[in-house]
Image: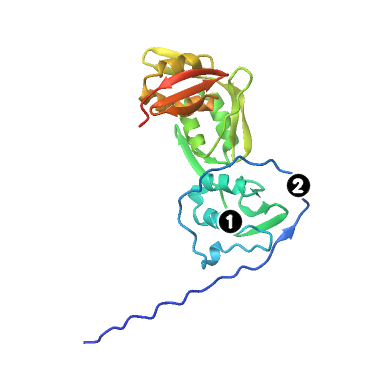
């Protein structure tokens, strides 16, 4: 009977990156909002050539790490994107494959094209975002009763919803690109037999869900899209702020 001997452990190898950066004229960009947390995802394999990102001096190592996350975990791009913004990364476009990104005056070439793609289906209509974002904006403006459903999906991508002077939603901003609705959005919410037209009846709706945690969480994203801000003020207590007026919403959030 042959006795097998264990193979010696493989030696650790260090991977070096080459310097291939380009210089372009300095441009002024708006400072992105601060992101307080980094997504919990698997670290890319540093010895995988597919995730090796060449960069030269002056490029923060955190930038390369997060770009490695982006390449190895494309499904987490919506979260990783916000972190990359805080690090100073800018992207040329999201409607076509991304071959390079900007870091200050540096052009960082990616080892392979990166495609941002989120598929969303509603009423048998398929939209691939951000490529079909304009089509989705047209669809929502023609089907305002479905806005609440679409808003939940867009919020998961980090979208924001600008409003006009009357509180109507005029479009959505996703990945720092604004997509306008052909017609400003209003929507209707039913609670039992009661009908609430948004944004006109937002204050009445907040009062109606004041002691209804289930309905509150169901409508929270829709209300936030219309500009309502929710602030936790204590155990089980949330303050809703809309148009400069405060409405207390008390519910058990534990």
- Total numbered labels placed on residues in the image: 2
Q: State which quadrant residue 28 falls in.
A: top right
Asked if the residue at tag 1 contacts the one at tag 2, i.e. Cβ–Cβ closer than 8 Å, the answer is no
Could you tell me how far apart the alpha carbons at marks 2 and 1 are, in whole angstroms? 22 Å
Picture coordinates of residue 192, whole percent (x, y):
36, 15
Residue 110 in the figure: left or right of residue 200: right
Q: Residue at x 47, y 29 (%)?
A: 221
Residue 27 in the figure: left or right of residue 40: right
Image quadrant in which the N terminus is located: bottom left
Q: Name the residue under label 2.
A: 27
Helix, strand or loop for disc 1: helix
Picture coordinates of residue 20, whole percent (x, y):
69, 64
Q: Which residue is drawn at 60% across and 28% down?
A: 162
Report whether residue 145 is seen: no
Badge 1 crowding class, 10 Å Cα cut-off, few under 14, some 14 to 19, many 20 or more, is few
Picture coordinates of residue 55, whole percent (x, y):
65, 62
Q: Looking at the image, is mark 2 or mark 1 earlier in the sequence?
A: 2
Q: Check the image and report above or below for 90 versus 194.
A: below
Q: Which residue is drawn at 51% across and 43% down?
A: 118
The outermost residue toward the front is: 234
Q: Residue 62 carries which label?
A: 1
Q: Check the image and report above or below for 167 versus 235.
A: above
Badge 2 crowding class, 10 Å Cα cut-off, few under 14, some 14 to 19, many 20 or more, is few
Report whether residue 78 is seen: yes
Helix, strand or loop for disc 2: loop
Picture coordinates of residue 87, whole percent (x, y):
62, 49
């Amino acid at each position: 009977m042959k006795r097998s001997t264990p193979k010696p452990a493989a030696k650790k190898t260090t991977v070096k990156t080459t310097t291939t950066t380009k210089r372009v004229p300095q441009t002024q960009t708006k400072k992105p909002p601060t992101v307080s947390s980094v997504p919990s995802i698997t670290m890319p394999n540093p010895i995988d050539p597919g995730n090796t990102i060449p960069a030269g001096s002056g490029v923060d190592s955190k930038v390369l790490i997060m770009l490695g996350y982006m390449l190895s975990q494309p499904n987490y791009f919506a979260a990783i994107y916000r972190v990359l913004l805080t690090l100073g990364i800018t992207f040329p476009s999201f409607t076509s494959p991304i071959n390079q990104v900007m870091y200050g005056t540096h052009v960082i070439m990616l080892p392979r094209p990166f495609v941002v793609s989120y598929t969303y289906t509603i009423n048998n209509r398929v939209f691939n975002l951000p490529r079909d974002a304009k089509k989705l904006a047209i669809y929502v403006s023609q089907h305002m009763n479905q806005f609440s459903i679409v808003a939940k999906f867009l919020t998961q991508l980090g979208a924001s919803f600008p409003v006009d002077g009357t509180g109507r939603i005029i479009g959505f901003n996703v990945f720092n690109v604004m997509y306008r609705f052909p017609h400003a959005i209003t929507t209707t919410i039913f609670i039992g037999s009661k009908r609430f037209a948004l944004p006109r009846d937002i204050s009445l709706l907040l009062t109606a869900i004041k002691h209804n945690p289930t309905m509150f969480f169901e409508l929270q994203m829709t209300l936030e899209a219309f500009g309502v801000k929710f602030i936790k003020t204590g155990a089980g207590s949330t303050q809703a702020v809309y148009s400069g007026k405060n409405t207390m919403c008390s519910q058990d959030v534990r």
